[in-house]
Image (cartoon, helix red, strand yellow):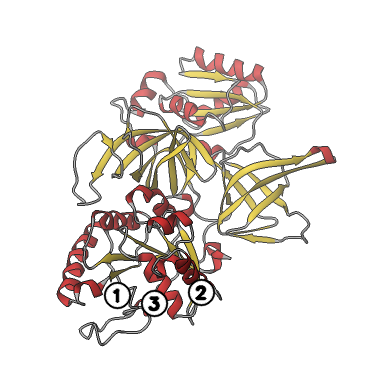
Amino acid sequence: MDSEKFPLVFVGHVDHGKSTIIGRLLHETGNLPEGKLAAIKSYCETNSRPFEYAFLIDALKDEQAQGITIDTARVFFKTKKRDFVIIDAPGHIEFLKNMITGASRAEAAFLVIAADEGIMENSRRHGYMLSMLGIRQVVVLVNKMDLVGFSERVFRQIENEFTRFGREIGISPLGFVPVSGIRGTNLKLRDTENTPWYNGKTLYEFLDIFEEKSPRREQPFRMFMQDIYRFTESDDNRRIYAGTISSGTVRRGDELVFYPSGKRSRIAQIEAFNSPEIVELSAGNTAGFTLTEQIYATRGELLTRADEPKPPHVGRRFRAAVFWLWEEPLSKSRSYTIKLGTARTTLRLVEITKLIDTSSLDLRGGGAVGKFEAAECLFETGREIAFDTIEENQECGRFVIVCDYEIRGGGIILEAFSEDTVTSSEVSSADRVNRFGNSAALLIVKNNFALAAALESALFRQGALTCLFSDINPIKNPSEIKILLRTGMLVILNSSTTFESSLFEKFPCFMIENETVEEILTKLRKENILR
């Protein structure tokens, strides 16, 4: 499986020779499938075209015809130390979305720069994208050294220029290698004849010094729920909660928490078609669970294990680094859709905090993010979602922005914001208590409208700021309830829905079932909710 191989991406400007380097490397290290080289040479002879090692990678016919990589090609490769999956990402600016898709799962990268052309705009743009995707293990290959007479001066000039550029984007290359993909220079063996002045590692030697991240199965458990399946036509009453495990491991009997709803239940059984009993599943596997307590959950909820120390963030606002791919700029005047895992909701641009020219890294002003521009922005979603920052969990910290059913941009979450962080008021909580005689609290009456109505009436007669809801779902509408709580209200919910009070963790929460109105008022005074 791919998950067992080290993911490595080759990026760079169009025509700088990525595919040629990979093809030549596969040939020199004996990693080509049997007959592949002969088949490509035969194709070239039949079509009266000169043989190119790039054709070993560029499998699509229209790529061979145009001489550019359009889609993201993947090849498998091994050294004595480990196995790799090599991703050849397209360099043409019009296929930048494909490049981002290809690079998104890589743990290390080779950035290819042609010696005869130097650092191009897309070289810088790809460097920035590697940084934004969190890829810190980068080696720069200065290719086509044969076209500049293997000049050390040209090599050092590119090395110095990109080193300065790397400091600006947070990348410190592990090394720079002078190579020639066509001749095989410094790919597997050091070329002392043409580059006697170079004493560093070859491309092949760099492959074995890349460090692997901790396996995804050892990270905190995360699974975005895809759907709940039932097979009622077969008289099967099971409710199977299904999705793909993004990270971590889960076992039968583990207690799960669903975010943002906060609901909990334990795994009764791990389900699979025509499979022996499963006790444990890890990252990369598609999973289906039955639970000991059936709960209402929706597509897009993020499942975690209750025994893990750090839950995901739950909220509507976050700061993110984004890259825009659409002709129409990303702006505050338009509503978008965010896709994070299986979660989907509306998305609004609140503020652009930093707008970056990816070719020069200059900061500039502006109220919108144009095509192929990058920015750091504050966003707000239409409802609460669960997520991690990119540093905490890469699988749950990436998202795409959709408009008119097309992907228009992508980003990574840098920081979670509570709504209190980005809103302010000149009226303090103490001012509200002095005015109304009560602090904010959530009073949840267990399916007893008569009691909830009598409680609201008693609080109102005492001058408290209060309101009653009997038709609002606290799981689907937590934001509305929080807004009322922030105004200092005593919010009464007459609800039959079971949910975690931690959904409103900043506010006192009281569960009311078999108490009288007077007993409730006494409790509120004792807790200093009522004066």
**On screen, residue 227 above or below 437:** below
Q: Quadrant of the N terminus?
A: bottom right
Contact flag, marks 2 and 1 (Cβ < 8 Å): no
**Amino acid residing under circle 3:** Ile
Residue at the (48%, 53%) spot, across then down: 395
How far apart are the alpha carbons under marks 2 and 1? 25 Å
Callout 2: helix, strand or loop? helix
Callout 1: helix, strand or loop? loop
**Amino acid residing under circle 2:** Ala
Q: Nearer the viewer, residue 294 or 79?
A: 79
How far apart are the alpha carbons under marks 3 and 2? 32 Å
Instruction: Classify residue 1 as left or right of residue 124.
Output: right
Residue at the (33%, 31%) spot, across then down: 423
The mark nearer the N terminus, 3 or 2, is 2
Rendered location of residue 158, percent (x, y): 19, 67
Residue topped by disc 2:
38
The mark nearer the N terminus, 2 or 1, is 2
Instruction: Classify residue 274 as left or right of residue 216.
Output: right
Q: Nearer the viewer, mark 1 or mark 3?
A: 1
Contact flag, marks 1 and 3 (Cβ < 8 Å): no
Q: Is residue 180 visible?
A: yes
Q: Is residue 109 visible?
A: no
Instruction: Classify residue 498 as left or right of residue 187.
Output: right
**On screen, residue 105 above or below 199:** above
Instruction: Classify residue 246 as left or right of residue 130.
Output: right
Which numbered circle lies on residue 179?
A: 1
Q: Quadrant of the C terminus?
A: top left
Residue topped by disc 3:
209
The mark nearer the N terminus, 1 or 3, is 1
**Amino acid residing under circle 1:** Val
Rendered location of residue 276, percent (x, y): 78, 61
Callout 3: helix, strand or loop? loop
